[in-house]
């Protein structure tokens, strides 16, 4: 991957692993998110925090923030502030993307794809939500879907995904 570029430093990606038995390719994950931010012209100086977690935390977040008492695959929390900060002060992230690794794994099995490929799809989807895109209405879907498809195609071309997430001996 080489040395980080200025854009990489300007669009930092924090990664928290809050589940066990999982290995994540951190450089590849960062590259994927940074590409999403770059393509969508996200504000320089701000990045995204990614939390890979279990179903229990995801269910609690889904219940507390969406009033749905069940797990889900991905939740995004955009930073509502966006307050300009004085020069030299690190800007807060654009938001957070939470992914349930067990749900990601179940969906990968259903779709007969590797878990890392499904994780890439979920990260792209969640990042677009952080950047303000949604799919609640037909107009929103028409705006978000082609962006998501373009980023997923880029990820496939650059083999982002298959080796993004590993589970010990079992790499599915």
Image: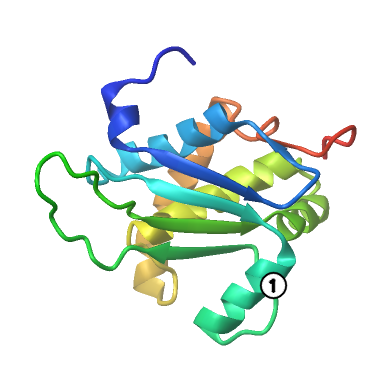
Q: Residue furthest right?
A: 169
Picture quadrant where residue 34 is located: top left
Q: Nearer the viewer, residue 89 or 92?
A: 89
Question: Dot 1, crowdedness within 10 Å: few (<14), some or many (≥20)?
Answer: some
Q: Residue at x 46, y 43 (%)?
A: 14
State which quarter of the image contains the C terminus. Answer: top right
Instruction: Report whether 49 appears left or right of 56.
Output: left
Q: Nearer the viewer, residue 74 or 24?
A: 24
Q: Residue furthest top?
A: 2
- Image coordinates of residue 70 in percent, x first then y, are 70, 79
Residue indicated by mark 1: 71
Q: Residue at x 35, y 42 (%)?
A: 37
> Tag 1's secondary structure?
loop
Q: Residue furthest left?
A: 86
Instruction: Report whether 69 appears left or right of 114.
Output: left
* Relative to 86, residue 160 above or below: above
- Image coordinates of residue 26 in percent, x first then y, are 57, 32
Picture quadrant where residue 55 is located: bottom right
- Image coordinates of residue 103 in percent, x first then y, are 73, 60
Q: How is the image coloured?
A: rainbow
Q: Residue at x 40, y 67 (%)?
A: 134
- Image coordinates of residue 65 in percent, x first then y, are 50, 80
* Relative to 110, residue 25 above or below: above
Picture quadrant where residue 99 is located: bottom right
In the rendered picture of this protein, how many numbered marks are placed on residues? 1
* Relative to 80, residue 2 above or below: above
Q: Nearer the viewer, residue 88 or 75?
A: 88
């Amino acid at each position: 991957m080489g040395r980080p570029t200025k854009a990489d430093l300007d669009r930092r990606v924090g990664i928290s692993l809050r589940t066990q038995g999982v290995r994540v390719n951190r450089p590849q994950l960062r590259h994927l998110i940074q590409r999403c931010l770059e393509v969508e012209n996200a504000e320089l100086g701000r990045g995204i925090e990614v939390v890979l977690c279990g179903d229990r935390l995801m269910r609690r977040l889904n219940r507390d923030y969406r009033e749905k008492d069940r797990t889900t695959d991905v939740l995004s929390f955009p930073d509502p502030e966006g307050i300009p900060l004085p020069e030299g002060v690190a800007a807060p992230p654009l938001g957070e993307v939470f992914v349930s690794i067990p749900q990601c794994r179940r969906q990968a099995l259903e779709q007969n794809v590797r878990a890392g490929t499904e994780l890439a799809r979920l990260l792209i989807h969640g990042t677009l939500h952080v950047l303000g895109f949604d799919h609640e209405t037909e107009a929103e879907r028409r705006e978000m879907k082609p962006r998501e498809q373009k980023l997923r195609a880029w990820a496939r071309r650059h083999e982002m995904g298959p080796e993004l997430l590993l589970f010990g001996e079992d790499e599915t």
